[in-house]
Image: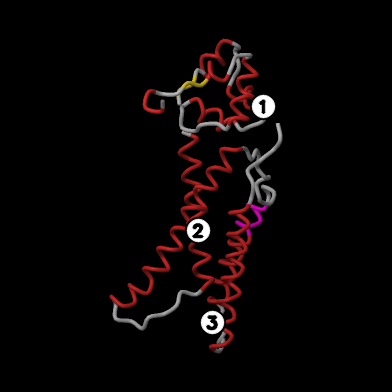
Amino acid sequence: MKKTKGKAVGVPNYFKKIGIVLIVLVIVVMFILKGIHYNFDATQKENIKIIYMTLINIGLAFIALAKEKIEDEMFVFLKLKSFYGAFFFGIVFTIIYPILDVITNDDIQQIPAQQLVTMMLFSHISTYFLLKRSENK
Amino acid sequence: MKNTLKVERAKLNLTQQDLADKVKVSRQTINSIETERYTPSTVLALKISKVFAISVNELFTLEEHEK
């Protein structure tokens, strides 16, 4: 039978572990830097924050894109469902964020792209994990 | 969609893992199909029915509300 579906996009399963290690390392380094009480100026602090967020996003992306040991059609379907959920969550978050600013009488601010990506990746990973667990019951 | 996967599996004395290995999917997928939480694709349904040497229609049947 001629294949109509393309292969699932993803990285090998061991990238899941690399992602987890990367996130844990970033958190550990974050606490160490906080612990040594070094006086960073405002620009340095902003740059460090961007580096943290980028590394965390890389780690989350590795976890999100890592294939299962046996990646079959059901897992692809579950991933699709959770990607859809994360996309929907991203839209709702983008709409609600400025409304919350108005309600709390703050200045209306744009959501930083990195923060949005982190939230969407986290939403995808947690939804996928829950879906997978419910299928295993 | 209902199926008689568990019955057919028992007839051949196959475990979920055995069947999963034969059709090259995970054991969780076979379990989900058996418990009717997941509806397999046409290709997978054909592969499974081939293992039991019966037609797809004998293995999978539509429920009343799906007809």
Which secondary structure type mostly characterizes the magenta part of the structure? helix
Q: Is residue A19 magenta?
A: yes
Estimate the x, y position of residue A65 in percent, counting from the top left: 62, 53
- Point out the tag, 2 or 3, that comes first from the N-terminus: 3
What separation in Å lies between label 2 and label 3 (alpha carbons)? 30 Å
Amino acid carrying label 1: it is: Asp
Query: What's the magenta region?
Result: A15-21
Amino acid carrying label 3: it is: His
For the residues tagged 1 and 2, is the chain the same? Answer: no
Reading the image, the residue beneath label 2 is A122
Q: State which chain disc 2 sits on.
A: A
Nearest to the eye among marks 1 and 3: give it. Answer: 1
Q: Residues within 10 Å of mark 3 (few under 14, many from 20)?
A: few
Residue at disc 1, secondary structure: helix
Reply above or below: B50 against A121.
above
For the residues tagged 2 and 3, is the chain the same? Answer: yes
The quarter holding residue B41 reads: top right
Farthest residue, direction top:
B11
Reading the image, the residue beneath label 3 is A37
Which residue is at a point 46% across and 53% down the rendered structure image? A85
Please state if A100 lies on the left or on the right of A54 as rendered. left
Estimate the x, y position of residue B37 in percent, counting from the top left: 46, 32
Nearest to the eye among marks 2 and 3: give it. Answer: 2
Residue at disc 3, secondary structure: loop
Estimate the x, y position of residue A52 in percent, counting from the top left: 58, 72
Q: Which mark is residue B21?
A: 1
Q: Quadrant of the N terminus of chain A?
A: top right
